Image (spheres, rainbow, N blue to C red):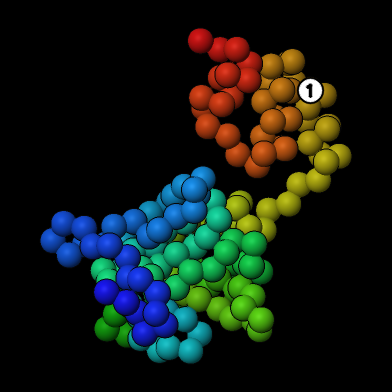
């Protein structure tokens, strides 16, 4: 099946449920949940699945990816009140991002604070080399090596860190 833009639709899983959106080789999902999405143009909420990877924020419905933005393009993350089902006001995350012009997407998801915090950590939280160097001075040699590795690579698996320090 093809989208109007000529791209292939994502493969469908058992009972018409979508499989995880296509990911780049080393891209992995950090958070996943059912939720709602609305952009700054469209007035209706859409229900589907949110996926936060180390590279992108993605919203999909059973047949396709509706929204995605690279995390490097996120410019703001705020909690706002928005009308949701039956006109009730709910807390939602407003994600400001670049697309050539400023744009905003609204998401509502169980565990809203966890999603807000994780999005912030992965997009807007900044720490500089001087702060890392100060922390490293207080650590034992193995911990220094791990923090240094994490700073250079931005993330690591437990297995990578274990190999790094020679843990069994």
Q: Residues within 10 Å of mark 1 (few under 14, many from 20)?
A: few
Residue 20 pos. (x, y %): 34, 56
Q: Is residue 129 left or right of residue 141?
A: right
Residue 113 pos. (x, y %): 48, 56
Q: Is residue 21 left or right of residue 102?
A: left
Residue with the mark numbered 1: 138
Tell me if residue 87 can be seen.
Answer: yes
| Above or below, 38 relative to 155 | below
What is the total number of numbered labels drawn onto the structure image? Answer: 1
**Dot 1 lies on which element?**
loop
Residue sitting at the far right: 130
Residue that appears at 73% across and 16% down: 140
Residue that appears at 27% across and 74% down: 1
Residue that appears at 53% across and 32% down: 157
Q: Quadrant of residue 44?
A: bottom left
State the residue in front, 91 or 19. Answer: 19
Residue 117 pos. (x, y %): 54, 54
Residue 91 pos. (x, y %): 44, 70
State the residue in front, 9 or 60. Answer: 9
State the residue in front, 154 or 6. Answer: 6
| Above or below, 138 relative to 38 | above
Q: Is residue 156 left or right of residue 85?
A: right
Residue that appears at 44% across and 64% down: 58
Q: Quadrant of residue 70?
A: bottom right
| Above or below, 17 relative to 136 | below
Tell me if residue 83 can be seen.
Answer: no
Residue sitting at the far left: 15
């Amino acid at each position: 099946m093809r989208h109007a833009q000529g791209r292939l639709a994502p493969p469908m899983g058992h009972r018409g449920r979508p499989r995880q959106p296509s990911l780049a080789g080393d891209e992995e999902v950090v958070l996943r949940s059912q939720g709602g999405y609305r952009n700054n143009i469209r007035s209706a909420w859409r229900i589907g699945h949110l996926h936060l990877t180390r590279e992108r924020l993605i919203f999909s419905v059973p047949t396709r990816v509706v929204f995605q933005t690279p995390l490097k393009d996120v410019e703001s993350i705020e909690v706002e009140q928005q009308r949701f089902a039956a006109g009730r006001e709910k807390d939602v995350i407003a994600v400001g991002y670049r697309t050539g012009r400023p744009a905003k997407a609204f998401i509502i998801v169980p565990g809203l604070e966890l999603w807000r915090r994780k999005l912030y950590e992965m997009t807007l939280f900044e720490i500089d080399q001087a702060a890392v160097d100060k922390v490293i001075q207080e650590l034992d040699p193995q911990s220094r090596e791990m923090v240094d590795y994490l700073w250079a690579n931005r993330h690591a698996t437990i297995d990578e860190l274990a190999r790094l320090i020679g843990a069994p």
